Amino acid sequence: MNVHALKMGWLMHLRRLFAVFLLLFCCKTQLFADDLSTVAQKAATCFVCHGEKGNSTDPQFHSLAQQQSVYIVNQLNAFKAGTRINPVMQAQSSKLTKEDINNYGAYFAVQQPTKAGGDPVLAQKGKEKATVCLGCHGKSGEGNGEFPRLAGQHPDYLAEQLMKYKNGIRKNDAMKAFAGNLSDEEINALAAFFGNL
């Protein structure tokens, strides 16, 4: 590993630590090491679909491990408010307090992720198109604040979400414009690329 790569690795690590610290400070959440086990116990209902510590083993559900805390908080609030539609998630989020939502965001942000993988040949085809995504979703697909982590997600899940943006089922003008210009083959190639990161 060269010195530049080592520096970049440390910078990414420090940025993640700072983001978690900032979230905890802003939310006035006292989430210390002792509290992680308490949050994990409450988050066990999330593990049913999203996997142990947020690492999904089912392609229909995305992983939450090392997902952006701000993104998790925003999405849980959107489910709770009914602005993002999913009957299961709306039912689950309706029971959560503001503190629960903030704690879940902080908890999942620090979990170690696993890689879902995907067809490596298809992933190579998606690499070139993915440069557009990396501007918002981070240089390595690691996410960036309100923009979710794409790296290591299940390709089937990512492809489904891109199709939902393309068809207007999920609402986001920028994502609809981007996905609207993709063929089904390009969507599958992008999903495979990010699944392999």
Image (tube, grey):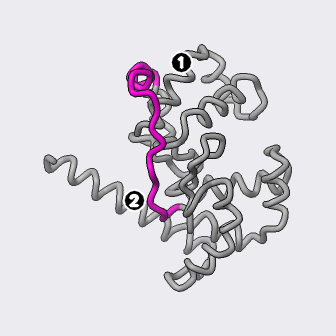
Residue 139 versus residue 94 in the image, above or below: above
Image vertical order of residue 41 relative to residue 185, above or below: below
Between residue 98 and residue 186, name the one nearer to us.
186
Tell me the amino acid under the disc marked 1.
Glu
- Write the start and end of the magenta stretch as one range: 109-129
Q: Nearer the viewer, residue 8 or 150?
A: 150
Marks 2 and 1 sit apart, C-alpha to C-alpha, by 31 Å
Percent coordinates x, y for residue 144 in the rendering: 50, 48
Residue 102 picture location, percent across and down: 65, 68
Q: Is residue 69 left or right of residue 164?
A: left
In this rendering, the answer to whether 121 lies above or below 69 is: above
Query: Where residue 101 sits: x, y (%)?
Result: 70, 66
Q: Could you tell me which residue is drawn at 48 percent across and 63 percent down?
A: 111
* Amino acid type for the residue under numbered disc 2: Arg
Quadrant in which residue 123 is drawn: top left
Q: Is residue 30 magenta?
A: no
**Which residue is pictured at 55% across the width and 15% down the height?**
185
28 and 41: which is toward the camera = 41
Quadrant where the image shows the C terminus: top left
Circle 2 — which element? helix
Q: Using the image, tell me which numbered label, if any, was put on residue 186.
A: 1
Mark 2 is surrounded, within 10 Å at the Cα level, by few (under 14), some (14 to 19) or many (20 or more) other residues, namely few
Where residue 15 is drawn, which disc sits there? 2
Q: Would you call the spot at circle 1 few (<14 residues within 10 Å), some (14-19), or many (20 or more)?
A: some
Residue 17 x, y percent position in the rendering: 42, 66
Residue 119 within the magenta-colored segment of the rendering: yes
